[in-house]
Image (cartoon, rainbow, N blue to C red):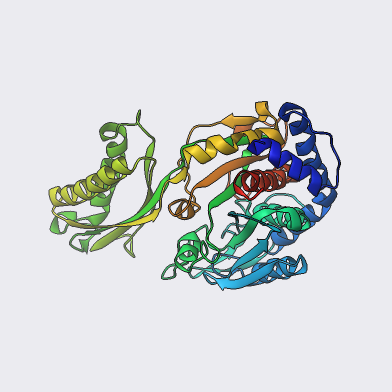
Amino acid sequence: MDRISTGLLIAVLLLGLQWPALAQQETTPKVYKQISEQTEKIFDQVVEWRRHFHKNPELSNKEEETAEYIADYLRDLGIKVETGIAHTGVVGVLEGGKEGPVVGLRADIDALPVKERADVPFKSTKTTTYLGKKVGVSHACGHDTHIAMLMGAATILADMKNDLHGTVKFIFQPAEEGAPPGEEGGAELMVKEGVLENPDVDVIFGQHINSQTEVGKIRYRPEGIMAASDRFVITVKGKQTHGSTPWTGVDPIVTSAKIIEGLQSIISRQTELTKAAAVISVGKIEAGVRNNIIPEEAEMIGTIRTLDTQMQNIIHKKIRHVATKTAESMGATAEVEIQEGYPVTYNDPELTDQMLPTLKGVAGTEDVILSDAITGAEDFSFYQKEVPGLYWFVGGMPKGMDPAEAPPHHTPDFYIEEKGMKLGVKSMVALTVDYMNQYGSQ
């Protein structure tokens, strides 16, 4: 019996149904329909979870209450739980009744320092101090839905425990948005602390809700789907002087402006953009204390996004060259520090091809869309460096809405249509069962 047929038969038995032996094309829609029905039964609870986390967001490495809530629920399901991984991470291990692979399922759990404006009854009103400033806190990237979807998948899979051909590792990861300065965190630290070991994970699946993809649709891409993200700091040193006599000093602010212009020419004139996209953005520049003092120093901080490792290395070299030589031409000096961040989020091509029928089975062939890579970044990539992984986007935009009018992620007006979570729950469950049934003992 082939993988899909075996997977379908097991799924049917798990749902307490009795079928005749049918051909693959006849049973596939029926089995995924049953997964859908199981999701519908628990969906009110999934929504309740999402709203709880939405009202109670916590920043990276500070997700103590979130982690406790998750851990308590997993224990109630009879799942073995370990807490305190990478500060506030929670891992649940569900051992199936039969031998088979270990499947990792991951959700990120942190919120952002963004004040929410979306008009919803469960709106976040939380504030905290971030980098010395009072800020609002909200799930402006949808991680609250990720938690709820994975808890929903855990609920369904726990009911299937005795017939699962393998083990499921539920990974609730903190600090996807980046650890606070001076701290480690996120997927990189979870991997370092052994999250993919004991038992060793064979394959890992992850998803991200998307506010500009229509509910009911999935977007995927083999190989690179999201960019590598690196951080740079350029410190320009000049000579301080009175603002009325700039010729008696060296202006680091004007020098910085020239460097910023030069950085953009790296992308527009020196990068082979037909090969892969790339971005250099300066997000912060700081210098001076008074209107009539040309300061001694200026600092700029920014991000580099690349989808190709060779291009990434070239761009790093060009940034150093442009910054130092531009500063030299102005009589200043520039120090460049580049910190490598998240690698490219790379979907294993064989695994993607293998599991594509499952995604189409739960969403419908016409609603599983091959998409271009994006220059956003995801630390799910650290898991994919260690084991084969598949990462996809699930729609959270209301049907019929123009994506151009949908508020993007990381903004105060970010909004998710909760019905989109249904497909996320179904995808996690179906991928787990289908993968196990291919490689588990029969």
Q: Nearer the viewer, residue 401 or 339?
A: 339
Q: Nearer the viewer, residue 104 or 228?
A: 104
On screen, 8 above or below 49? above
What residue appears at the point 59 percent right and 47 percent down from the top-left corner?
Answer: 439
- Residue 413, position as x, y percentages in the image: 64, 47
Q: Quadrant of residue 364?
A: top right
Asked whether the viewer can see residue 369, the reply is yes
What residue appears at the point 52 percent right and 58 percent down from the top-left corner?
Answer: 176
Q: Nearer the viewer, residue 318 or 282?
A: 318
Give the tally of numbered discs: 0
Report the side of 417 relative to 293 (left or right). Answer: right
Q: Quadrant of residue 188?
A: bottom left
Q: Quadrant of residue 292?
A: bottom left
- Residue 13, position as x, y percentages in the image: 80, 46
- Residue 82, position as x, y percentages in the image: 61, 71
On screen, 284 above or below 24? below
Asked whether the viewer can see residue 415, the reply is no
Report the side of 429 relative to 173 (left or right). Answer: right
- Residue 49, position as x, y percentages in the image: 75, 58
Report the side of 184 relative to 56 (left or right). Answer: left
On screen, 156 above or below 62? above
Q: What quarter of the picture does the N terminus occupy? A: top right
Q: Nearer the viewer, residue 403 or 238?
A: 403
What residue appears at the point 66 percent right and 26 percent down from the top-left corner?
Answer: 366
